Amino acid sequence: MPADPTAEVRVLDTYEGVDLLRRAAGWGRGFLGVDPVTQNSTLMVRLLTEAEAETYQVAAHGSAVAVAGCVRNPANRHQALVAIAELPSAGPDGAPADADPRRPAASASPAELAKVIRRFLTYLSTHRDITSFVAHAVVGDGALPGLIDSGFCEVGRLREHVYRSGGFHDEHVFFARLAKVLESSGADPSSGAEREREWERERGEPS
Amino acid sequence: MMTLELVGYRAAHAELLRGHWLTGELISPSRPAAPGPAPARTLEPAPPRPESRVLVAPDLGFVRYLEISWVSRRARLEIGYAGDPDPDRAAVLLGAAVRHAFGAFRLRRLHGWVTPAAGLPERVLAEAGFVCEARVEEAGWYAGAAVERQIWGCLDAG
């Protein structure tokens, strides 16, 4: 019997989710509208609770690799805003590696993150009856290449929507249906990183 | 075009917040005759949290600034008024909402959700400085089907 792809997704309460998000540090910036680099845990718990967010831990081979979350769209309950933040891998002594606020040193490849995203979306589709997904990301967010590689398509750009690191940045809006996400498992795994580099060049950032 | 000043909500303005509103819509006339109209409901008059504000234009309609981020200096906007869709009323209310946001609140960005299937007030939005920034499929439910919704955004030019 094939392994259940949703078996490695575990529901968390909001406090546990925020604890994992703090471990994700820089990778978790913009996660459902919160920022673990500039906001404390109490504030993040309050914001996620008010948004009625659900948080999850996604594991691979028994080890937690990402914290994920979703907020149902109040105008269509079968659609959800989703977010995923990679957890830094453990250092040689077993402690989590230091996470640089902008981009942690130790991370899975976008292809691995795309697999994690697919696993999470399959879980939401199977157990939460969610049929379409929306995601938001700013250039520099750890999850952005993985979102593109997992089949999300850009459907818009919110101009100067987010203030971060001394400037206002566009927030890219992405959309996907589960069928497209599952089809994307054979796609070019480098396309997300390439798209992010193009947007960084547009913005004048070093790629 | 008349220039409208918004005022703070008082109990006497309660009727302005009651109507058949489209959930989270940028411009929402109260439309009991729309296909499968939402039940009449009264929006929350008092800010449920520090990150929202409710203002009214007496005898015209309401303006709600929601999901305010004082760090990113932005808010999601909703305006509403009783009666059939009226571009002139919508334009006056929207103009007042934008002026108040950029002037009194010193925000620099507003955005909101628009459901084209419910009637797209493109001219009113464009004249107020809004631009369509995103199109999200199946983001709303209208007249028995999942429909596209758009995000329209406006930046302070000043």
Image (cartoon, rainbow, N blue to C red):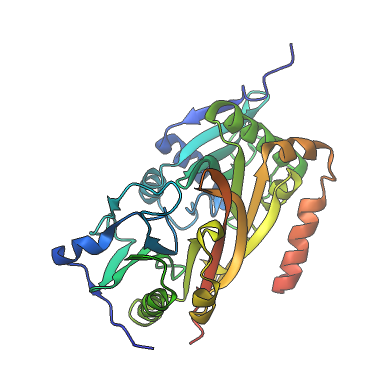
Return the residue nearer the eye: B82 or A119. Answer: B82
Is B94 placed above or below A69 here?
below
Which residue is at 63% across, 23% downward?
A62
Compared across the picture, whether A57 is left or right of A187 comes to left
Which residue is at 71% across, 17% downward?
A3
Say which quadrant the N terminus of chain B sits in.
Answer: bottom left
Return the residue nearer the eye: B98 or B148. Answer: B148
Q: Position of residue A150 (x, y in %)?
A: 73, 43
Return the residue nearer the eye: B157 or B78. Answer: B78
Q: Is residue B109 visible?
A: yes
Which residue is at 51% across, 39% downward?
A20
Return the residue nearer the eye: B156 or A9. Answer: B156
Q: What is the tally of numbered marks visible in this picture?
A: 0
Which residue is at 42% across, 67% downward?
B85
Q: Position of residue A161 (x, y in %)?
A: 54, 67
Q: Position of residue A120 (x, y in %)?
A: 62, 34
Q: Quadrant of residue A1?
A: top right
Is A112 placed above or below B113 here?
above
Q: Position of residue A95 (x, y in %)?
A: 58, 36
* Residue that extends furthest to the top in the rendered view of this protein: A1
* Residue that extends furthest to the left in the rendered view of this protein: B12
Is B12 placed above or below A180 here?
below
Q: Is residue A81 visible?
A: no
